[in-house]
Image (cartoon, rainbow, N blue to C red):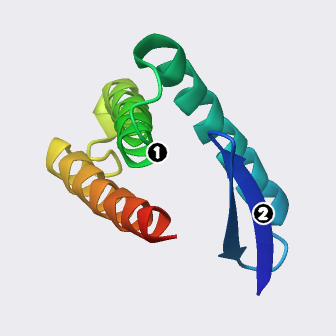
Amino acid sequence: MAQVDVTINDRSYRIACDDGQDGHLTELANYVDGRVQELVSSVGQVGDARLLVMASLLIADELSESLTALNSREGSKEDNSPTMEHVAQTMENLAAHIERIAARLEAA
């Protein structure tokens, strides 16, 4: 299992990932850091945990909008399109995962 050092909000974190996924994880961390930096610009440094939760919610909102748009485009293929219940469950799962990550980061 590989380990990658990523930086978010000028703090370094060592994250484990599957072998070969380190580049992808680095890209994801850079995206999250970009969203956090946007928040810092608008609300200031309000604490790492709060910034990560806020950034996670923004990213989850992007995901929700993308799934809704996909669902609308594929409306004629309802059997393959995600339902709103599925999107809601996915969002809840994502939020729980983000909260677990934030708790681990806060403890570090």
In which quarter of the view is residue 36 placed? top right
Can you identify the residue that label 2 sits on? 5
Q: Circle 2: is it few (<14), some (14-19), or many (20+) Cα within 10 Å?
A: few
* Residue drawn where x is 26% and y is 47% of the image: 87
Find residue 50 and report its horizontal and vertical position in percent. Answer: 35, 41
Tag of residue 48: 1
Find residue 101 and report its horizontal and vertical position in percent. Answer: 44, 64
Marks 2 and 1, the one that precedes in the sequence: 2
* Residue drawn where x is 36% and y is 27% of the image: 65
Residue at the left extreme of this rendering: 85
Find residue 83 and report its horizontal and vertical position in percent. Answer: 21, 46
Disc 2, SS: strand
Disc 1, SS: helix
Where is 55 relative to 14, above or below? above
The foreground one among 20 and 84 is: 20
Where is 24 relative to 71, above or below? below
The foreground one among 107 and 5 is: 107
In which quarter of the view is residue 32 placed? top right
The foreground one among 11 and 32 is: 11
- The Cα–Cα distance between marks 2 and 1, rounded to whole angstroms, is 17 Å
Q: Give the residue type at disc 2.
A: Asp
Where is 86 relative to 68, above or below? below
The foreground one among 20 and 11 is: 11
How many circles with numbers are drawn on the protein?
A: 2
* Residue drawn where x is 78% and y is 76% of the image: 3
Residue contact between numbered discs 2 and 1, judged by CB atoms under 8 Å:
no
Where is 97 relative to 77, above or below? below
Q: Circle 1: is it few (<14), some (14-19), or many (20+) Cα within 10 Å?
A: some
* Residue drawn where x is 81% and y is 65% of the image: 22
Q: Give the residue type at disc 1.
A: Asp
In this view, the mark in front (2 or 1): 1
